[in-house]
Image (tube, rainbow, N blue to C red):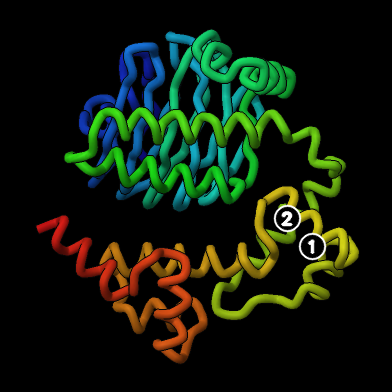
């Protein structure tokens, strides 16, 4: 493991730092960023860590850090509290001047926003103020499963930031949309009609559901394993994650398949088999419903973009 070093994010975006091995020892990476004149900064970072890497991070600019992890994740130790941030998780933190320890290993792909509290409250109005107060009450970092609207907005911002031809207007619009989705999801967290124990059990159920993308457990199996009745499980999934159990499972299958195909790690047939499809025609139809294109078309577009 690389020796720990301290990195101050002040004046930088994570996507800037990953291009400087002297500051941030990431391996191969792709990144993009955008900063508005009023202080909202957005970034996308696809980084690969060739060996376990530990970094101590702080931000002397006292900004809020809001991020969506689209793939894999990171271990974080903040003020003695340990977090495992996984793919499809959202993270909100306000740690003014406080260092936090991170451990990276493998591939890390996240999209995020940085802004001062006063900018958040100006842009978000009363809901922004509620979000900020909610975050301060929780203290440290707040990690939660990404709502479907948040994940969609994060993926769209990611694509725009990585496209060198995208307009500043579109980049700003997508940055603001992700901020609005994060505020709506975070500020409403206490108004879901779910107890803390129910939210914890639903997250356990989600993890069990996605553990094997080739064969899903039944609703009854999930309900028994997490200690909720089937009605509460189905209702809770819609409230907490914004999707039904099957829709969330299907979305995850198609996202994993897309990552494998676009990255070149698997062929279309291999990716389909990996997520449980023996019939490639059925796989292609399911894939197009989620991504708007056949898997072979998406792979071809990626190769053209990289050429």
Which residue is drawn at the image coordinates 74% and 19% (left, top)? 137
Point 54% across, 43% down: residue:
150
The label number, if any, that marks residue 171 in the structure image: none
Q: Residues within 10 Å of mark 1 (few under 14, many from 20)?
A: some
User: Which numbered tag is attached to residue 238?
Assistant: 2
Where residue 191 appears, x then y in whole percent? 80, 35
Quarter in which the N terminus is drawn: top left
Query: Horizontal placement of 113 versus 199: left or right?
Result: left
Q: Position of residue 167 (x, y in %)?
A: 23, 34
Query: Depth check: 198 or 105 in front?
Result: 198
Distance from Cα at disc 2 to Cα at disc 1: 7 Å
Quadrant of residue 43 within the rendered picture: top left
Q: Nearer the viewer, residue 31 or 75?
A: 31
- Number of callouts: 2
Q: Position of residue 54 (x, y in %)?
A: 42, 35
Label placed on residue 234: 1
Q: Are marks 2 and 1 in contact (CB under 8 Å)?
A: yes
The answer to which quarter of the image holds residue 29 is top left
Residue at (41, 19) in percent of width and height: 40
């Amino acid at each position: 493991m690389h020796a720990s070093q301290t990195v101050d994010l002040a004046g930088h975006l994570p996507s800037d730092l990953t291009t400087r091995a002297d500051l941030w020892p990431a391996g191969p990476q792709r990144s993009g960023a955008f900063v508005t004149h009023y202080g909202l900064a957005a970034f996308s970072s696809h980084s690969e860590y060739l060996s376990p890497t530990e970094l101590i991070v702080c931000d002397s600019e006292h900004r809020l850090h809001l991020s969506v992890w689209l793939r894999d994740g990171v271990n974080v130790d903040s003020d003695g509290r340990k977090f495992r941030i996984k793919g499809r998780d959202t993270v909100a933190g306000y740690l003014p001047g406080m260092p936090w320890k991170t451990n990276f290993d493998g591939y890390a792909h996240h999209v995020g926003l940085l802004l001062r509290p006063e900018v958040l409250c100006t842009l978000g109005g009363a809901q922004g103020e509620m979000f900020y107060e909610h975050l301060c009450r929780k203290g440290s970092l707040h990690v939660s499963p990404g709502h479907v609207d948040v994940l969609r907005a994060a993926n769209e911002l990611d694509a725009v930031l990585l496209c060198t031809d995208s307009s500043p207007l579109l980049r700003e619009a997508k940055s603001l949309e992700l901020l609005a989705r994060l505020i709506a999801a975070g500020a409403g967290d206490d108004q879901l009609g779910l107890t803390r124990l129910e939210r914890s059990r639903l997250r356990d159920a989600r993890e069990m559901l996605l553990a094997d993308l080739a064969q899903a457990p039944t609703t009854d199996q999930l309900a028994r394993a997490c200690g909720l009745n089937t009605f509460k499980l189905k209702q809770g999934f819609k409230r907490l994650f914004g999707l039904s159990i099957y829709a969330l499972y299907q979305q995850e299958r198609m996202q994993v398949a897309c990552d494998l195909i676009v990255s070149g790690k698997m062929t279309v047939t291999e990716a389909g088999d990996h997520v449980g499809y023996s019939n490639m025609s059925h796989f292609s139809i399911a894939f197009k419903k989620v991504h708007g294109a056949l898997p072979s078309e998406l792979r071809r577009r990626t190769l053209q973009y990289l050429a």
